Image: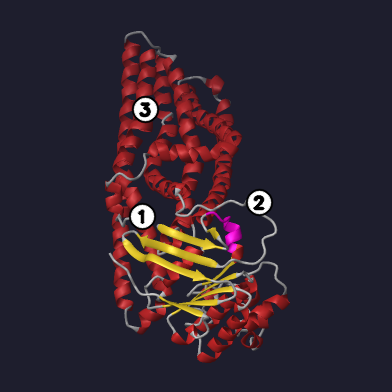
């Protein structure tokens, strides 16, 4: 059965219009679930925040009573003012402690998810978008954890207490207050979130695409300058920036209109409470002091629900970021890792590898069709063919980066889909066409092939890869640091580091994908000679389009391109 590995390309606008984003409630529910380990601190923040708002509200109420002749409560005003400041600080401290602690936890979860999803996740994927998720999207979640969860709870608790307090003067006044709190704290945020949610998702997605474009432009800076494409790139960046700016303006319009509506509703409800209190006073159902108290309480108690109304502005982008992070955490890997298990003892030797009637396709594009090849132990098997015929794909199937659609891939006599992943990696050394060099010393870069390797082992591997003599000419020899992305090294030097890693790993199955494509004939000869010497002890699969490289092989498979759309 064919597996659809290629995600459908969809613009942010189409994705938002198609309703692919889950509901705001489900996003918030999933994000709140992460707070469980820090629940006692969250409860403390809610209690402190509620007490702080009550101090602020009753500061206004008592001030009105002082103006109306209540001198006996005058001494409470400074006490409430100081208490409000202390409680607000303590609440914010708790909320930010929770936020930054959870951001660290989420980052660990995201990196764990990427380890589970890779390498297939990064095959032709938008790396800039992933970087955006790892940085800005996770950072935006701070708004939710520090300024959303406890404010919602604080607003609910405080509003219920104020409804009870105002209602104790008269039931109608309490009912009016309840409706006002619901409109400002729930109806307006829901209305604003509904109209701006899709726009927030589009903005976050386009922001990630902008990151990808800038990253791509920086990596291709030399080519851009060489071929005079700077002006074109500048215009493209300008166009994307303008599109982002337009999206931001749309969100700003939503924010401004929401604030205007919120302020209007607060003003209307404050006057409504004033007129209701005066009406009840004239009817003899409420004293004048209670009328002043109800009006002051209504006007001074919108703070918690106003905080909720303001949240909907930033919450559009925050929930969009939450959706992107949650989607990554919940994404299923293309290939599930096989856990460790006990293996039969006493197995001697290595049985080689084999591809039997293998068919593989990326989406509808067939790369391999009914392909078979046997890789015998102690021999170098070459795979020769033009670019795009599936040579590299075959090696990735042997590494089980992907699973074949049909047919069997075996290593050491066992299906790769049944071999524990760690054991499979131990059985194989894989040299890719493009070797990634970390921003570290040359010794550390080679030692990736065998953590804890001695200096002698590293130097032996470097000699086999025709690297040792060149390293000796460097100022700090093996301790010389290479630049970011290996910019201080040539393509051939990076390729030889990759070959040295494979020699150091010393696995029985050696998979080499164009290992000498960037080398001159002299260095190619040294490496091929080392391969020939290693070939008698290992199973070597050598992929290349060079006829000179194929002369080293004991057996050569010719591969022709059979791609069909």
- Viewer-nearest of labels 1 and 2? 2
Residue 342, disc: 2
Boundaries of the magenta span: 418-425
Which element carries disc 1, helix, strand or loop?
loop
Task: Identify the residue shown where x is 61% and y is 73%.
Answer: 538
Residue 142 sits above or below residue 287 on the image? below
| Residue situated in front as seen by the camera: 75 or 509 | 509
Name which of mark 2 and mark 3 comes first in the sequence.
3
Magenta stretch holds residue 320 = no
Mark 1 or 3: in front is: 1
Could you tell which of marks 1 and 3 lies nearer the N-terminus? Answer: 1
* Residue in view at x 50 percent, y 86 percent: 551
Circle nearer the N terminus (1, 2)? 1
- Mark 2, Cα crowd under 10 Å, few <14 / some 14-19 / many 20+, is few
Q: Position of residue 239 (x, y in %)?
A: 28, 65
Front position in the image: 285 or 552 = 552
Q: How many marks?
A: 3
* Residue nearest the observer in this picture, 553 or 206: 553
Q: Which residue is mark 1?
A: 4
The 10 Å Cα crowd at callout 1, few under 14, some 14 to 19, many 20 or more, is few
Above or below residue 396? Residue 225 is below
Question: Residue 422 lies in magenta, yes or no?
Answer: yes
* Residue 310 position in % (x across, y down): 39, 40
Q: Which residue is mark 3?
A: 182
Q: Secondary structure at mark 3?
A: helix
């Amino acid at each position: 059965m064919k597996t659809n590995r290629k995600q459908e390309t969809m613009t942010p606008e189409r994705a938002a219009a198609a309703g692919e984003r889950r509901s705001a409630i489900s996003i918030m529910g999933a994000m709140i679930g992460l707070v469980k380990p820090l629940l006692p601190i969250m409860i403390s923040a809610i209690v402190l925040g509620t007490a702080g708002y009550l101090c602020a509200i009753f500061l206004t109420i008592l001030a009105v009573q002082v103006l109306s002749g209540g001198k006996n409560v005058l001494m409470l005003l400074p006490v409430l003012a100081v208490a409000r400041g202390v409680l607000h600080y303590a609440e914010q401290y708790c909320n930010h402690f929770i936020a930054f602690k959870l951001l660290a936890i989420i980052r660990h979860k995201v990196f764990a998810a990427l380890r589970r999803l890779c390498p297939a996740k990064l095959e032709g994927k938008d790396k800039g978008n992933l970087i955006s998720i790892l940085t800005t999207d996770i950072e935006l979640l701070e708004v939710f954890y520090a300024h959303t969860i406890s404010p919602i709870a604080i607003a609910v608790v405080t509003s219920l207490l104020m409804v009870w307090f105002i209602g104790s003067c008269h039931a109608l006044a309490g009912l009016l207050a309840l409706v006002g709190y619901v409109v400002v704290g729930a109806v307006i945020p829901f209305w604003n979130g509904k109209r701006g949610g899709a726009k927030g998702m589009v903005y976050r997605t386009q922001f990630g695409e902008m990151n990808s474009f800038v990253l791509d432009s920086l990596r291709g800076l030399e080519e851009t300058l060489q071929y005079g494409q700077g002006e074109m790139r500048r215009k493209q960046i300008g166009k994307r920036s303008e599109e982002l700016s337009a999206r931001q303006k749309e969100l700003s319009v939503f924010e401004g209109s929401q604030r205007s509506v919120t302020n209007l509703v607060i003003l209307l409800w404050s006057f409504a409470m004033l007129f209701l209190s005066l009406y009840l006073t004239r009817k003899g159902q409420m004293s004048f002091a209670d009328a002043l108290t109800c009006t002051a309480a209504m006007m001074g108690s919108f703070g918690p629900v106003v905080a909720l109304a303001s949240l909907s502005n930033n919450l559009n982008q925050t929930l969009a970021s939450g959706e992107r992070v949650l989607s990554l955490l919940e994404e299923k890997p293309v290939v599930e890792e096989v856990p460790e298990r006990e293996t039969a003892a006493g197995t001697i030797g290595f049985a080689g590898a084999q591809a039997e009637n293998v068919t593989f396709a990326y989406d509808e594009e067939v790369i391999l069709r009914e392909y078979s090849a046997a890789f015998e132990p102690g021999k170098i098997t070459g795979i020769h063919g033009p670019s795009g015929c599936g040579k590299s794909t075959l090696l990735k199937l042997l590494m089980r980066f992907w699973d074949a659609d049909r047919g069997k891939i075996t290593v050491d006599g066992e299906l790769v889909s049944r071999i524990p992943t760690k054991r499979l990696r131990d059985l194989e050394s894989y040299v890719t066409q493009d070797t990634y060099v970390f921003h570290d010393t040359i010794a550390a870069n080679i030692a990736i092939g065998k953590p804890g390797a001695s200096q002698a082992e590293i130097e032996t591997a470097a000699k086999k890869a025709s690297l040792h003599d060149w390293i000796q000419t460097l100022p700090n020899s093996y301790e010389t640091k290479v630049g970011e992305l290996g910019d201080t090294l040539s393509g051939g030097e990076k390729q030889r580091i990759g070959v040295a890693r494979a020699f150091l790993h010393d696995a029985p199955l050696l998979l080499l994908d164009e290992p000498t494509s960037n080398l001159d004939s002299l260095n190619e000869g040294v490496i091929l000679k080392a391969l020939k010497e290693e070939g008698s002890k290992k199973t070597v699969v050598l992929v290349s389009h060079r006829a000179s490289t194929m002369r080293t092989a004991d057996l050569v498979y010719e591969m022709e391109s059979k791609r069909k759309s």
